[in-house]
Image: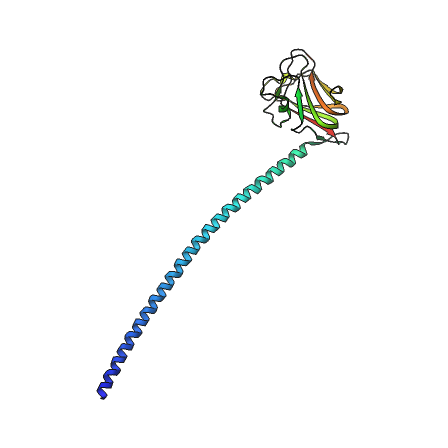
């Protein structure tokens, strides 16, 4: 009987060793699975994080570029506004009152590509152009009465600056009641920028540029009218 118990004890010890060995192997396998799973999750998370980071970085770059452009546009607008305000020697401030959008007309139209409005569209590459005629003119309606002090006239940049000559600049509350601001003998040259000051400020809503000769052409790249504050 003792031998039987001894044999049973040996069998139990053997089974226990096998069980412990199997348990150890299972634990090691489980650990490897956990590590693999964790690494897989970390890899997927890193990939997802990189994708999200790249996406939002792109969004930030787009927003940054847009804000930078808006800031540059704001600076340009500010510079343009500053350029439109000039300090005169008589301690008066003058500002531009002829920004595009005002009503214009001219004595005739040379083809349909050169309307009077081209002279206040802000682009020196375009220009107004009348047909050859006696006393051609160009008129700007400022919309309200201003105390006009100075007019800048830009000749064409491609050719024909000499079209501007013997030119009267008159200002008045109506087109039938005009006062001479100043006279320009000329002729101008291509790309000229003429600064023509009134002998004294003239109250008026309408500004008229006219050439007092025969067979003349009125061609203007740009006209800017400045009034006293």
Spot occupied by residue 47 in the image (x, y as percentages of width and height): 43, 53
Q: Residue at x 23, y 83 (%)?
A: 7
The one of 152 and 12 positioned closer to us in this rendering: 12
Spot occupied by residue 212 in the image (x, y as percentages of width and height): 70, 14
Q: Residue at x 27, y 77 (%)?
A: 15
Q: Residue at x 28, y 74 (%)?
A: 18
Spot occupied by residue 179 in the image (x, y as percentages of width and height): 76, 20
Q: Quadrant of the N terminus?
A: bottom left
Spot occupied by residue 51 in the image (x, y as percentages of width and height): 45, 50
Above or below, 190 against 23 in this view is above
Q: Quadrant of the C terminus?
A: top right
Residue extending furthest top? 214
Above or below, 4 against 196 in this view is below
The one of 177 and 212 positioned closer to us in this rendering: 177
Above or below, 103 against 64 in this view is above
Above or below, 182 against 14 in this view is above
The one of 115 and 97 positioned closer to us in this rendering: 115
């Amino acid at each position: 009987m003792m031998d039987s118990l001894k044999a049973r004890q040996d069998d139990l010890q053997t089974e226990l060793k096998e069980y412990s060995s199997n348990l150890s192997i299972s634990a090691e396998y489980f650990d490897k699975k956990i590590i693999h799973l964790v690494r897989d999750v970390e890899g997927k998370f890193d990939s997802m994080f990189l994708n999200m980071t790249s996406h939002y970085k792109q969004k930030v770059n787009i927003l940054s570029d847009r804000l930078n452009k808006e800031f540059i546009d704001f600076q340009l607008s500010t510079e343009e506004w500053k350029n439109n305000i000039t300090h005169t020697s008589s301690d008066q401030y003058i500002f531009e009152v002829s920004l595009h959008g005002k009503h214009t007309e001219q004595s005739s139209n040379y083809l349909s590509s050169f309307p009077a409005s081209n002279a206040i569209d802000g682009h020196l590459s375009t220009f107004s152009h009348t047909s050859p005629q006696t006393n051609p003119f160009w008129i700007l309606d400022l919309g309200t009465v201003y105390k006009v002090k100075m007019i800048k006239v830009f000749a064409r940049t491609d050719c024909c600056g000499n079209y501007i000559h013997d030119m009267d600049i008159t200002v008045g509350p109506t087109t039938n009641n005009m006062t001479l601001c100043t006279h320009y003998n000329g002729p101008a040259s291509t790309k000229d920028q003429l600064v023509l000051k009134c002998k004294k400020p003239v109250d008026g809503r309408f500004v008229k540029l006219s050439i007092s000769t025969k067979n003349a052409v009125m061609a203007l790249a740009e006209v800017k009218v400045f009034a006293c504050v």
